[in-house]
Amino acid sequence: MLTIILNVALSIWIYMSLFFLLAVIKEDNSIADIGWGLGFVIITIIALLQGTSPGMRGIVYLLVILWGLRLSIHIYLRNRGRGEDYRYAKWRQEWGKWLLPRSYFQIFILQGLLMIIIAYPVILIASAPREPLGTAGILGTLLWLLGFYFEVMGDLQLLRFKKDPDNKGKIIQTGLWRYTRHPNYFGEVVMWWGIFLLALPVQSGWTAVISPLLITYLLLKVSGVPMLEKKYAGNVQFELYKQRTCAFFPWFPKKPWSINKHT
């Protein structure tokens, strides 16, 4: 497994360094978001080529590659022609003369490190002997499919909503967004818990829990939910939406009388 990890680390370092150079040329650090999904594809391919044959548990390769490609294509199409994302533009202003080193280490190299940690279950499975899928593997695959549905449908519904000129300045509150303010982030977290279940039965599989724990923490406390919630803070429509709709876990929206009772 150490050989795979070292090769993955070297490949991701080269990959993210090239993305950094492209970002410098384009003056757009938000292309790091496009590189995020593709980075997992690279890690998975390396694990596939250098690991053992894990049998049916090798479905993890297909799942991660499908997720990574879909996510990168979606972000590329969404951001095309829009310029640098507001988060990265803000950092560009704040960092001043330290822009280049901080961009390299705090955006690109840090994301590369996070990729490797989150993809650890894939490396673990690639290093394990051939084993049947088992109950945990089946449950993990089903859980991944549920998460994939939430992420894909959440992104698709939001994209359609924003394309309608009548919705300009409005907050989406239909489809999956009626039950959670962040269905796409919820889906991504659920997928990685599914990947963890796929890795759980292999030797030292329990250590793979670091992957879903990390992505859950990042999306709930760092770069996902908090940033978007802060962006729309103070928006009257969003504040009302926030009162009746769960932030993360899908649930039925609160009734108006229930909201008034707690305000």
Image: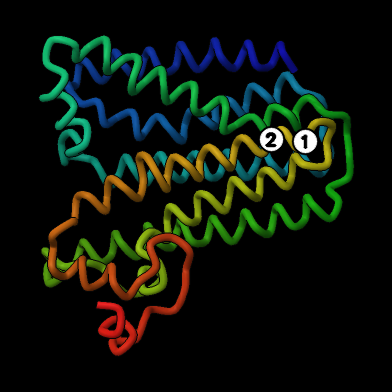
Nearer to us in this view, 257 or 132:
257
The residue located at (11%, 64%) in the rendering is 169
Badge 2 crowding class, 10 Å Cα cut-off, few under 14, some 14 to 19, many 20 or more, is: many
Could you tell me how many numbered marks the image carries? Answer: 2
Label 1: few (<14), some (14–19) or many (≥20) C-alpha neighbours in 10 Å: some
Residue under label 2, please give it.
Answer: 208
Q: Quadrant of the C terminus?
A: bottom left
- Front position in the image: 234 or 196: 234
Say whether residue 171 is left or right of residue 246. left
User: Would you say 181 lies left or right of 213 here?
Assistant: left
Residue 16's place in the image compared with 222, above or below, is above
Q: Which residue is mark 1?
A: 205
Residue at image location 74% in from the left, 57% down from the top = 139
At 70% from the left and 22% from the top, the residue drawn is 49
Kind of residue at disc 1 = Gly
The residue lying toward the viewer, choosing from 42 and 122, is 122
Query: Residue pushed farthest front?
Result: 262
Name which residue type carries label 2: Ala
Residue 209 location in percent, x, y?
A: 66, 39
* Foreground pick, 85 / 45: 85
Q: Which mark is residue 85?
A: none
Position of residue 175 measured from the top left corner of the image (x, y, whole percent): 38, 73
Separation (CA) of disc 1 from disc 2: 6 Å
Judged from this view, the residue extending furthest toward the bottom is 257
Check the picture and name the quadrant holding the N terminus: top right
**Dot 1 lies on which element?**
helix
Q: Residue at x 26, y 68 (%)?
A: 172
Does residue 141 lie above or below 12 as drawn? below
Percent position of residue 225, x then y: 35, 50
